[in-house]
Amino acid sequence: MESTFSSPVETVLQREAGVPGLLTPLADLDQVYELERVVGFVRDLGCQRVALQFPDQLLGDAGAVAARLEEITGSKMFILGDTAYGSCCVDVLGAEHAGAEALVHFGTACLSPPARPLPIAFILGQRSVALELCAKAFEVQNPDPTAPVVLLSEPACAHALEALATLLHPKYQDLLVSSPALPLPLGSSSPEPKPLERFGRHFPLAPGRCLEEYGAFYVGSCKASPDSDLDPDLSRLLLGWAPGKPFFSCCPDTGQTQDEGVRAGRLRARRWYLVERARDAHVVGLLVGTLGVARHCEALAHLRNLSQAAGKRSYVLALGQPTPAKLANFPEIDVFVLLACPLGALAPKPSGSFFRPVLTPCELEAACNPAWPPPGLAPYLTHYADLLPGSPFHVPLPPPESELWDAPDVSLISGELRPPLAWRPLNVPGCSALTPRPQLELAESSPAASFLSSRSWKGLEPRLGQTPVTEAVSGRRGIAIAYEDEGSS
């Protein structure tokens, strides 16, 4: 029987590792997986035990890649293929269980800093890009050669951006090329000024320039479905890019372009709807969606303090990857907040039949912090680290005596007037408040207790002192389809 708190055993046993029809030929392994760079990484560190992390769609090549690396380097390779949350985050915990001294991550990565110090190499892949077709598409969508534009791409196409910029630079002078924000090796520091890091990418802006001045040209994706929610990386960019600036996506194979302005507006409207749902909520479920990304414990404490300050009750749930069946076990929770990396937080689909909406930490911040957003802030943040102290986007909670807590507010969903936010610090336990009731009964004043009282069935009632005491008697014998006292039918 399938358990609602874990994946069914039969599914795990019957699932195939990788796609058999897409296995990489042995002659192409060195190029596809950049084994020369991996070998240099292992030899420079002198590692004897290395963990190799593959997403599900690449597990078919994992054995051949590990064997080739062991043959060349002489080091022991361990394959990590069963991540508890998402394959885009580095599984530093799994690498520590194997006693690995370094980790090599293959496939799409969110490039979030790991929770533990461990040397990591990212192999993002090299998807083929039709440079001539993409250059012509860029010229069609950007007729003004003086307009500032940023070249973006999915991680697998990042290797071709410099070559594409070379074709465009003779005509376009204000062209900015982004690059993946790969973490620096441990103990190393760059003498040059660090470029702006946003959306998991580096933007080498000139002095006095800001990213909000630029339009965007994205190379990648090109799915058959028009729903941008299927691509968390593209959704992350569309949500965070400055409204009003042009944003075009280009298929790297065909050069077909699409204006993403309509989809970006639809995504932002969906996110603001979720903010309204969070403002109406009384009970918040905090879903632990990562254990391998840095500062996740600090972010969890921040979300709890945020919910408590806004007068909402929060519960922390660790359920692995969220599914509708798992979250339906908690009907008393009004909204869920998924604490995960930027790509993992945007992965749950709105059409995924979830019983309650699944939000990101930034949406809860916008709903519970009356001082949000600060002036000049980008329309939408995608990483919970941007909400924590030390970030330029951190907005502290106003003091209890601030007038912001008493500002009137009307729900845009129900049309009713919301009560003022009840500021309460986290160290004041609200669950100890008891309300006296008739017949010397006590009930906890909490949203969960109120939800239980509204149910038609509340479980077995003890009815102490109301049921007469009788002696034990012999009951029926047999099985349900044929008790001994029923006779034959």
Image: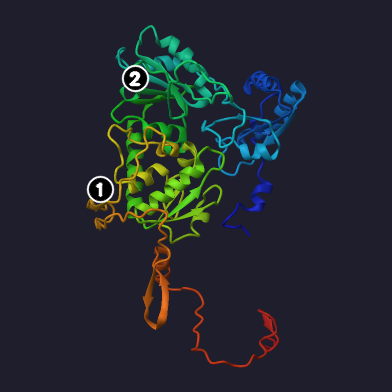
Give the residue at x 61% y 30%: 105
Disc 2 marks which residue?
141
Drawn side of residue 440 relative to residue 295, left or right = left
- Mark with earlier residue (1, 2): 2
Give the residue at x 32% y 35%: 379
Q: Is mark 2 on a helix, strand or loop?
A: helix
Give the residue at x 74% y 22%: 73
Disc 1 marks which residue?
404
Provide residue 274's location: percent of width, then percent of height.
Answer: 36, 47
Quadrant in the picture for the C terminus: bottom right
Q: Work out whether 168 lies above or below 338.
A: above
In the image, what residue type sits under mark 2?
Gln
Drawn side of residue 372 relative to residue 95, left or right = left
Distance of mark 1 from mark 2, alpha carbons? 44 Å
* Closer to the camera in the image, 338 or 252: 338
The extreme top residue here reads 170
Q: Work out whether 148 lies above or below 53.
A: above
Question: Which numbered tag is attached to residue 353?
Answer: none
* Closer to the camera in the image, 273 or 479: 273
Provide residue 35's location: percent of width, then percent of height.
Answer: 67, 21
